[in-house]
Image (cartoon, grey):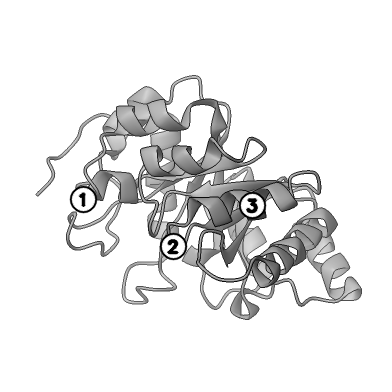
Amino acid sequence: MRLALSTLGTPGLSPADSVGLARRFGLDGLELRLHPDTGVHAGLGAAERAAVVRTLGTLTPFCLSGYVRICEPGDDGPVIEALRADLRLARDLGADFVRVFPGGGDLDAGARRLSAVADEGPRVLVETHDALPTGAAVAALLARAPHAGAIWDLLHPWRHGEEPAETLRWLGDRLACVQIKDAASAGDTTPVLLGEGFVPLAAARGLLDGFGGWVSLEWERTWYPGIPPVEDVLPGALDWVAGRGPGAGGSRRVR
């Protein structure tokens, strides 16, 4: 497993600062949140894109996390064009993946839109989120979109009643990335340090021996500015990937 840091956890930091933080902790890459606030988004010009590439250096921007909602009702055209803009940016920055959210639950629309960009690269990953929060729900979409893959956000399938083994069974070899986090409870998703909450981190880690994809620490400080800085969480994430420490050797019960 290769560990990355999502820049959702570094609000206010420049790309250079996020790169420096990742290097300081010996991480393998970054999951770049696409938003004007982060300095990385589809509206960047050619010179700005080249500057981001220089800033990254040898650090891998493995995934660009955009906000296209692939299964939202409505016209296909604007959704496909927004996704294509993110894919163009990913090609320019050297990212292998672009994240999309389901948004709504229109599987027919989602399949059409994913199929429209199937040959354009990089690979599109659908996150367990929104109207498709479980592995079973995302798998139903991916069955109609053979070129797309999945991101398993550990929080959402669990809080919707799907056990980790079931999620992994549904996503199977379409799984490209696991986003790790912990939360106060199923009803209170305020982030807490890994191993101090109720997300079944130990069960998930036990299932992922041999997983060769990416793990991304998604510390949601952008949405919860009062939580500790990501530097306080990264040691636990490194331990989790290594199969030791917080969340790797024991589980707490859902409350």
What distance separates the C-alpha of mark 1 from that of mark 2?
Answer: 28 Å
Find disc 1 in the rendering and name its residue: 197
Q: Which of pointers 1 and 3 lies earlier in the amino acid sequence?
A: 3
Q: Is residue 243 visible?
A: no
Expressed as whole percent of the image width and height from the top left, the position of residue 157 reads 31, 45
The residue under label 2 is 104
Residue type (three-letter) at the residue carrying disc 2: Gly
**Left or right: 75, with 196 as reference point:** right
Q: Earlier in the sequence, mark 2 or mark 3?
A: 2
SS for callout 2? loop
Q: In the image, 156: left or right of 25?
A: left
Q: State the residue lying farthest toward the right.
A: 47
Label 2 crowding class (10 Å Cα cut-off): few <14, some 14-19, many 20+? some
Q: Which residue is mark 3?
A: 112
Task: Give the amino acid type for the residue marked by disc 1 in the picture.
Answer: Gly
User: Whole-Å distance between the Cαs marked 2 and 3?
Assistant: 14 Å
Gap between marks 1 and 3, in whole Å?
Answer: 38 Å
Viewport quadrant of the N terminus = top right
